[in-house]
Amino acid sequence: MNTMHYKYAVEVERTHSITQAAENLFMAQPNLSKAIKELEENLGIEIFRRTSKGVVPTEKGAEFLIYAKNILAELEKMEALSKPDNPDRQSLNISIPRGSYIASGFINFVSELDPEKEIDINFQETNSIQTITNVVENSFSLGVIRFQTIYENYYLDYLKEKNLCHDLIFEFEYLALMSKKHKLAAAKTVGFDELCNSIEIVHGDLSVPYLSAKSTKMQAQASAASKKILVYERGSQFELLAQIPETYMWVSPVPESMLKRYDLIQRKCEFPDNRFKDLLIYKQGYSFTRLDKLFIDKMYTSRNDVALKEYK
């Protein structure tokens, strides 16, 4: 069986599109469709099905793709054995939530890299379930996940099931982030109900299938909001908050430098179960590199900057 077909299938799953996958793989769409068909015939299963959301794996297909990704990861390791070690290569692979203090730590990390040496950084902002999948499937060495503390046991059980280790980074309350021109900006503490007439900005990929019907209060409120904007890119959220004064967003504490850059403020808001945790996750037996440790140090430093600030 041609292992290149594994790579094709993984790319189709990632893009949810035969056409886009073919473009990314620099091959004709009919050739990719034929390769996937041949792979399905060899396996004796249907890997993908078409839906209104694009091409998605079948149940058996999803199981196959896990094995395919692991095989590809092991092949990469085998190929790396034949390559000379490069002590000057600066590498980091980490998947994180969209948290400004983490992004700030990452910027400080990058600022200390040597621009004269090779740099290979893979830094992805996504939801917690995708981050766990990334680390399990070897796409990323490290991850940071975020969850509401009332669901901590669900996440810890899930991490245990996936043989992942975890370290606490930060426990915090969500704050309401908004423009200084927002009608509630003058208040020191914002009432939860006072925000119902504002436009909520929500990250569009926060669904947590592991919790199935058990959604957090924050998610339930977001899905029920009559005025909301779904975004997938963190830069867009800041532009919307800065330029549309009627918007707001729930966030972990944001560094002062980012608030000043976009002319924003953050306010406390009392509501039940407003406690969240960020955990660093990694595989059992993983050996942290020098750059892993440098990034983690910068992330903790950035966390301390926002954690020590008093929010009234």
Image: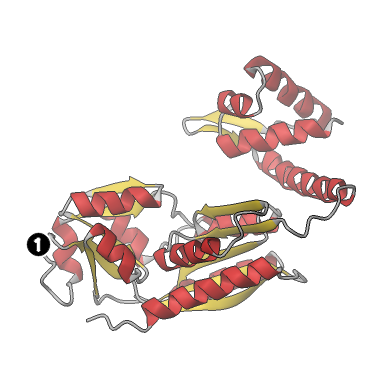
Task: Looking at the picture, tell me which residue is in the foreground, 108 or 92.
Answer: 108
In the foreground, 116 or 262: 116
In depth, the one of 218 and 302 nearer the eye is: 302
In the displayed structure, 177 sits above or below 121; it is below
Horizontal and vertical percent position of residue 149 = 45, 76
| Residue 181 appears left or right of 97 | left
Residue 101 coordinates in the image, percent (x, y): 42, 68
Residue type, numbered disc 1 = Lys
Which image quadrant is residue 3 in?
top right
Colouring scheme applied when the structure was drawn:
secondary structure
Could you say whether the residue bearing mark 1 is in a helix, strand or loop?
A: loop
Residue 67 position, x and y percent, is 77, 46
Query: Looking at the image, can residue 57 be seen?
Result: no
**Residue 111: x %, y % from top left:** 52, 62
Q: Residue at x 56, y 75 (%)?
A: 297
Quarter of the picture containing the N terminus is top right
Report the quarter where the C terminus lies: bottom left
User: How packed is label 1: few (under 14 Cα within 10 Å), some, or many (20 or more)?
Assistant: few
Q: Is residue 72 visible?
A: yes
Horizontally, residue 62 falls left or right of residue 204, namely: right
213, above or below 83, in the image: below
Going 28% across and 60% down the picture, which residue do you hit?
A: 261
Q: For the image shown, how many numbered marks are present on the structure?
A: 1
In this picture, residue 46 sits left or right of residue 15? right
Residue under circle 1? Answer: 183
Q: Quadrant of residue 291?
A: bottom right
Q: Is residue 18 above or below residue 305?
A: above
Residue farthest toward the front in the current orientation of the protein: 116
